[in-house]
Amino acid sequence: MYQLSITRDFIAQHFLIGGDWGAENQRHSHHYRVELVIAGSALDRHGYLIDIVDVDRVLSEVTAIFRDTTLNEHAAFHDLNPSIERFARLLWEMLVQRLALQDKTLSIKLWENGTDWAAYGPAA
């Protein structure tokens, strides 16, 4: 199985809702790092699993949507707690819609700091 991984860093804010999580209930920033991993069993005629330039472009476009914004203000989080788990799934859904994956799988790992992360996808 071949795998290709790309990472991107960005800063976004959020505040947790629906419970008493102390300081997490106040707007605060995270330095997010998203890693996507695309896996598949075959390479194309050029020896590529997928065109890394296209993947890089799509990942940059998706992360730009959230960069320097407050997650709670995005329609996808309306009345939902913008947890790292939900954010990982949202990023996965957006990337799957934009990438030509055919017979490949995509998984996402999203860090909200240097030690804490959530993952989503079949190979997560």
Image (cartoon, rainbow, N blue to C red):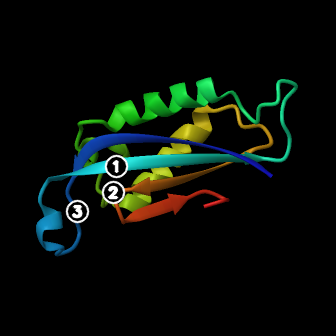
Q: Is residue 98 above or below residue 70?
A: above
Q: Quadrant of residue 122?
A: bottom right
Question: Residue at image x 63%, y 33%?
Answer: 99
Three-letter residue code for mark 3: Leu
Question: Residue at image x 22%, y 44%?
Answer: 70
Question: Residue at image x 36%, y 32%?
Answer: 65
**Mark 3 and mark 1: Cα distance apart in space:** 16 Å
Dot 3 or dot 1, earlier in sequence? 3
Q: Secondary structure at mark 1?
A: strand
Residue occupied by mark 1: 32
Residue 57, how many percent across, how many down?
A: 52, 25
Q: Secondary structure at mark 3?
A: loop
Three-letter residue code for mark 2: Glu
Quadrant that contains the C terminus: bottom right
Residue occupied by mark 3: 16
Instruction: Assess whether mark 1 and mark 2 are in contact (beta carbons under 8 angstroms).
Output: yes
